[in-house]
Structures are given as C-alpha cells and as structure tokens.
Amino acid sequence: MAYTSKYLNATKDLTMRFRKKQAKCLGGVCCNNQSSLKLAKSSDNLLPKCRSPVIKKKEQMMEIISELQGCTSQLAKCNLAFKILKLCSEVEGTYAKEMKAVVGVIGDVLFLQKDKIDNEVLIQIYENNTEAILSSETIPSTYVIQASRALLTRYKNENLSLKSQATQLSTGIP
C-alpha cells in the first residue's frame, strides 16, 4: 500500500515540530542552527515502509560486515562473505544477471554438498572443525582440502611403516 502525499506531508510536519522542540535546548545550550537540525534529522529513523530497497540492502550488508569483523570461525566467515556476495547480486542493475551467474559459480567452487563428500573425509572434517557438524548442507572446500591432506599424510605414514615391516620380514630381521 503506497502512502499518500497527504500522509507523508503530515508525518513530515510532525517530525519537524518534534525535531525543533528536541533541538531547542540540549543540556541548557540552545542549538537552533541548521547544522544541529541536520544532525537530528539524519539520526532520525525512517519508517520501514518508506525506505528504499537500496537502503535496506545497505543496512543488511552493514549488519553482515559487522558480524564478519567480529567473527573468529572460518566457516562462519566464509558463509558471511558469500552472503554479502549474494546480496550484491540481488541488486537490480546493469549487470544483475551476470552477478547472479558469477555468484552461482563461486558458490559451487567455495562450498561442497555434504552428501558428495567421502565419509572418511567428512569424519576428518568433523574432528578438526566441530562447527561444521551444525552447518547447513554445504561445507567450504578449504575444509575438504585440509581434511584430505591430513588423511593423505596419515596414509603415507602408515604405508611407510608397512613397507619397513615388509622389508624386515623379507630380510628375516625381527
């Protein structure tokens, strides 16, 4: 439902009166100058229905970025960064279709479906990164690479020990 100009004008008049009353005296100091009115006006929250989609996207991005800066988990950082990319791709514009295609490709490269990962690798991921157990249906590919490297190292060591045992048995040295 769109707001009528009459409603918007009435709201504007009420907020201006409120701002003038609020800005008259702060702590016993009068501040009727334009800069203080602009400051009061800029800090005023707009009605959610009157905000443009661009402002809503910007707020969502700022919330995600603040979460990203305080985050220590690699899994959460990866998910938040990808969420920002998705938000950017949802903004309609000249390259909206291209951005969506790029985000789709990046998503396929960065995240792997849990059901497509070998069980042994998945168990290794869960041992090293317990937060991955509770994550969604996808896991960052970096976790899969780290787990695969750990398994490869373990199997190489086992192979070397088996080879040394085999040579000991073949030479007859107990």
Image (cartoon, rainbow, N blue to C red):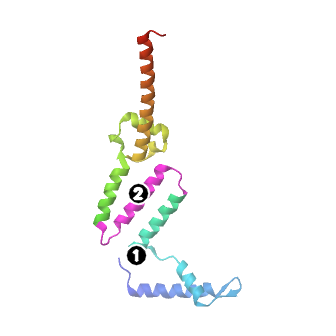
Residue 41: x %, y % from top left: 54, 82
Task: Point out which mark residue 121 bears.
Answer: none
Report the residue marked by disc 2: 82
How crowded is the residue under tag 1: few (<14 C-alpha within 10 Å), some, or many (20+)? few
**Quarter holding residue 85:** bottom left
Q: Quadrant of residue 18?
A: bottom right
Q: Which mark is residue 52?
A: 1
- Residue range corresponding to the magenta coloring: 70-96
Does the magenta run of residues contain 102? no
Please report whichever mark, 1 or 2, sits nearer to the chain's N-terminal start. Answer: 1
**Between 166 and 155, the one nearer to me in the picture:** 166
Name the side, left or right, on which 146 lies relative to 29. Answer: left
Q: How far apart are marks 1 and 2 (CA)?
A: 23 Å
Image point 44% across, 9% down: which residue? 172
**Most foreground residue, 125 or 152:** 152
Whether residue 169 is visible to the viewer of this picture, yes or no, is yes
Residue sitting at x 38%, y 81%: 3
Residue 130 locus on image (x, y percent) = 49, 41
Element class at badge 1: loop
Element on which disc 2 rests: helix
Tell me which amino acid carries mark 2: Phe
Does residue 18 appear to the left or right of 142 in the view shown?
A: right
Q: Is residue 66 above or below residue 165?
A: below
Looking at the rendered image, the disc whose residue lies closer to the viewer, 1 or 2, is 2
Q: Residues within 10 Å of mark 2 (few under 14, many from 20)?
A: some
